[in-house]
Image (cartoon, rainbow, N blue to C red):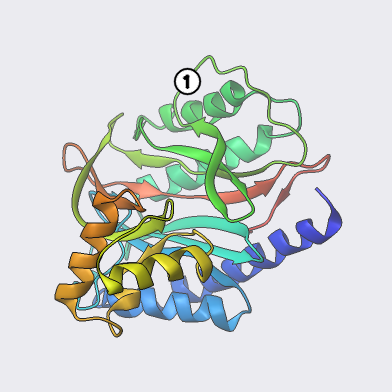
Amino acid sequence: MDDEIIEKYKKAGKAGAEIKKEILETIKPGTKILNLAEKIEKMIVDKGCGIAFPVNIGINEITAHYTPSHDDERVIEKGDLVKIDTGLHVDGFVADMAYTYCDQPHEYIKAAEEAVKAALDVIKPGVTVGKVSEAIYESVEAKGLGVIRNLTGHGLDEYVIHGPPNIPNIRNENNAVIEEGMAIAIEPFITESDGTVKDSQPTEIYSFLQPKAVRMNEARQILEVSAIEFNGLPFAKRWFAGVFSQMKLSMALRQLVQAEALHPYPVLKESQGRPVAQAEHTILVLEDPVVTTL
């Protein structure tokens, strides 16, 4: 990984850390999540970065892939566990980070943060994926809590937000070696005991898969923008709300998914309806590893 790329990762990570600090100082019960998402996305752009994916705001059992719709009226309530997952990029080099807000202290939040720290303490060139996973799981297990088994940390690359290697949050026998030059997002999800997530509704996030011939003009426009302007990175349905009517937008997206031109990201919910906390940082695996999002 050359110095120019390292600096791009660092710039994105520094901006993300600054945004996190400001959001945690101002968020409170009564905050409308649509306003929060739009505020964070504007802050990303104002700091000279690109939006790597729509801001995810998952409340309680809503674990991942929830971004507000254009007319979302939901507000944060007292006691909610609010997961804020943010992606920033500089020329495609991504800082992926997440944190959980609650208006009162919560053991899940502390456990998620400490699980990330446990992983960061062991990551270095030559360490196996299994060793990193073990550090995460042991940290959570020691607190009598569990993880979401079917969500993992992951590699990052230029305009790629989910690439190899996958870093499970449970013990495993994966002997794949973490190599110098990798960018990795460590991402544990914590709940009462080990669990899973399942696909749910709605779907508000999509990404480009491949060019396809489609009938609707609106669908062709969305496909072109997703491939060229967004460089294949995920986008929110609400980003097109002022361009097309909601009926035509929904029809166009459905046509593109059916044609396998776009990949949909259904909302993921904890299978038993239990609240979940999340923490995430991005690390550059160098001779002296660098956490870009601190």
Name the side, left or right, on which 58 lies relative to 87: left
| Image x and y of residue 52, in percent | 51, 63
The residue drawn where x is 85% and y is 57% is 3
In the rendered view, would you say 49 is above or below 165?
below
In the rendered view, would you say 244 is above or below 273?
below
| Image x and y of residue 116, in percent | 54, 42
Name the side, left or right, on which 200 lies relative to 113: left
Q: Quadrant of residue 165?
A: top right
The residue drawn where x is 63% and y is 61% is 92
The residue drawn where x is 24% and y is 71% is 69
Q: Quadrant of residue 45?
A: bottom right
Which residue type carries mark 1?
Answer: Arg
Name the side, left or right, on which 175 lies relative to 218: right
Q: Quadrant of residue 206?
A: bottom left
Q: Which residue is mark 1?
A: 171
| Image x and y of residue 201, in percent | 17, 53
Q: Nearer the viewer, residue 174 or 23?
A: 174
In the rendered view, would you say 260 is above or below 174?
below
